[in-house]
Amino acid sequence: MRSWIGRICIGLGGFLVVAGLLGLVWAPGVVERTPLDVNTTTYLDGEAGKIDVSTGELVRNPIYAISVTRTDSEVSTDDTVAWVSSSCVMIDRGGERVCEDGSADMITAGVDVFATDRHTGLAVNEGIDLPADATPHEGLVNKWPFDAQQETYPYWDGTLGRTVDAEFDRVDEVDGIEVYVYSVTVTRNAAEVAADTNGFYSTSKEIWVEPMTGAILNQTENQQRWLENGTPVLDLQLAFTDDQVLESAADARDNMSLLTLVTSTIPLVGLIGGPILLVVGLVLVRRRKQAPAAHHPREMAAAGR
């Protein structure tokens, strides 16, 4: 019996040691990568002042924004993920929240095609088959890297067509999850403020990032646009809806649990419990081999005569 138990302990201990080593050395490079099957819809709301061309004055209305982001698995590779992101900002008239092409209530809309490194989140423009008219991107676009740090990152600004600094500002909490908050500030830069219309653009963003996964759990923006003569054409404030913040936090919590299991729990159990079982198993096997052989009763009787 001891021999069998010892062999089981040795086998299980060896398995745990191997699993621990894989979790420590190999698993992080595998699990800390953006999935290739992402399809998410993000909802924001707020308020905006949009120019009334008949009066030249800003008219304020409640607004909502919808951003649909999905991966293109046919174009993506082992190291790079391709994205298609469509978004709109609409005046909220109280009806169903959808993007309505051609509607007078549409403030902005667009489609963006880009690719990012599956681990660092940085934009990639080479080695992947993006459409010929896709705008080359730089820096971080739609997520932070796994194991994000308290430092400044280059962040893509689509209005300017270049990166700006996303500076670490503070540690905060979203629905019980510790997050890093990064701030982005653009002050009255020359930009295309509408189709074929040049002017000036400012924005102030705060981005709440869960550092283990790099997921964005909340975002606020305060944006202004002016014509070249200084006439204001847009004054916009947006943020994730309350429900969106909770949904983003729940998704991040699930992903954090998986990462913790694979990269921390399994290595800890494997590299501590595995050697203990190996030692126990070896001791039991050795004791079985060293135990004196039992004598048959007839042999014992003969020896007593």
Image (cartoon, rainbow, N blue to C red):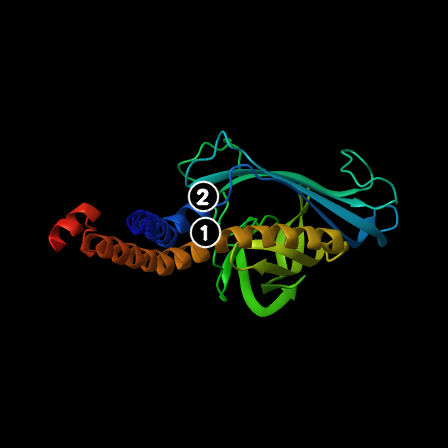
In front: 147, or 93? 147
**Relative horizontal placement of residue 96, taking residue 150 as reference (left or right):** right
Residue found at the very far top of the displayed protein: 74
Residue flagged by tag 2: what amino acid is it?
A: Val
Using the image as rendered, state which of residue 44 and residue 295 is in the foreground.
Answer: 295
Q: Secondary structure at mark 2?
A: loop
> Dot 2 corresponds to which residue?
124
Among numbered discs 1 and 2, the one appearing first in the sequence: 2
Q: Give percent across and percent down for residue 197.
A: 68, 45
Q: Would residue 145 be seen by someone viewing this image from the given angle?
A: no
Give the x, y percent position of residue 117.
45, 45
Q: Which residue is mark 1?
A: 262
244 to 171, vertically: above or below: above
Q: Is residue 254 left or right of residue 153?
A: right
Q: Position of residue 192 (x, y in %)?
A: 64, 47
List x then y, in percent, for residue 252. 59, 53
